[in-house]
Image (spheres, rainbow, N blue to C red):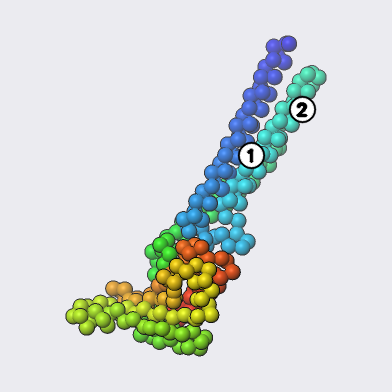
Amino acid sequence: MPPSNLSDYLAAECAFLAWIRTGLALAGFGFVIARFGLFLRAMRFDQALSGPGSVGSPGFGAAFILAGSLALVWSAWSYTRLVRRIRRGESEPSQGSFFAIAIAVPLAALGVALAIHLLSVNAAAMQPTQETSMSSNNGIVTIPSHHSVEQTVQRLEEILAAKGVKLFAVIDHSGEAEKAGLQMRPCKLLIFGNPKAGTPLMLASPLAALDLPLKILVWEKMDDTVWLSYNDSAYLQHRHGLPDTLLGNIAVVDALAAKAAE
C-alpha cells in the first residue's frame, strides 16, 4: 500500500474514532440528564415543570441520546464511503462536514434550552422560601392566606357548610395555651369530613382512620402572616396504599384550603 494511501486510511480511521467518541459522549450525557430529571421528580422539585405538554429533563436527555445515535450512524456511513473512495484512488473533496455543522447548531440550541430548564427547576426548588406559597417534602402542604386567622377559619366554616361537609371540631390551640398562662400566636385546627367520602378510604385501608377526618391548620407566623397547612393528598395515598380511584375523596382538601385563602 502506498504511503500516501496508508496515511489517508489512518486519517479516515482517526476521524471515524473521533466521531464514535463524540456519539458515545452525547448519548452518555443524554442518559445523565434523563436520570437527573427523574431524580428531581423523586425529590418533588420538578413537579412544576412536569405537567402535560412539558418536556422536562427526560426530554432533553432523549434529544441528546438521539443526537449521539445519529452521529454514530453518520460516522459509520461516512467512514465506509471514504474508504471506498480511497480504494478507488479518488480524492475526497476538501470541504467542511455538513453533518458536523448540522449537529452542532441543534446541540447549541439544546444546551441553551437545557440551561434555561435547569434554572427554572432551581427556581421551583427555591419556591418554598418565598412568601407566596410553600410545600414541604414531609407530606405537609402550606399555603398563605390573605385573611387573619379568625377570618380564614370563618371562611372555611362557611365553605364547609355550603358544601354539606360536617365540621367535627375546631381546636383553638392558642386559646388553650392562653388558659394555661402561656403565649402562642393564633393557631386553630379544623377537623372535618364526610362519611360518604371517608368510609371507602377506611374500607380500603383501615389504618387510614389515623389521618381521618381531614384537617386544616390555620396559624400565624411571627411576621403576622397567616398560613393554612394540611396533609398532602398524594402523601396520604402513598402512606396508606389507597387506589387512584379514591384519591379524589381526600384531594378535596386542596380546593377547600385554596378557596378559604383567597
Q: Earlier in the sequence, mark 2 or mark 1?
A: 1
Question: Residue, x 51% and y 58% (percent of image)?
Answer: 46
Crowding near pointer 2: few (<14 within 10 Å), some, many (20+)? Answer: few
User: Residue 106's x, y, as percent?
Assistant: 64, 46
Depth check, front residue: 119 or 186 = 186
Residue under the image location 67 percent in, 34 percent down: 72
The residue at 69%/32% (across/down) is: 75
Residue that sits furthest to the left in the current view = 181
Q: Marks 2/1: CA distance? A: 20 Å
Residue 99 in view in this figure:
yes
Callout 1 secondary element? helix
Residue 193 or 8: which is nearer the viewer? 193
Residue labelled with disc 1: 68
Whole-percent x and y of residue 189? 36, 78
Which quarter shows the N terminus?
A: top right
Tell me the kind of residue under disc 1. Gly
Residue 69, above or below 222: above
Q: Nearer the viewer, mark 2 or mark 1?
A: 1
Which residue is labeled 2 in the image?
81
126 or 213: nearer the eye?
213
Q: Is residue 245 above or below residue 169?
A: above
Neighbours of disc 1 within 10 Å: few (<14), some (14-19), many (20+): many
The answer to which image quadrant residue 187 occupies is bottom left
Horizontal arrangement in the rendering, residue 158 relative to residue 21 (left or right): left
Residue 234 visible, this orientation: no
Residue lying at 76% horizontally and 20% vertically, measured from the top left: 86
* Residue 37: % across, % down: 53, 51
Spot occupied by residue 245 in the image (x, y as percentages of width and height)? 59, 69
Proximity of marks 2 and 1: CB atoms separated by less than 8 Å: no
Inspect the image, locate mark 2, and give the three-letter code of the amino acid beneath it.
Arg
- The total of numbered circles placed on residues is 2
Residue 49 location, quadrant: bottom right
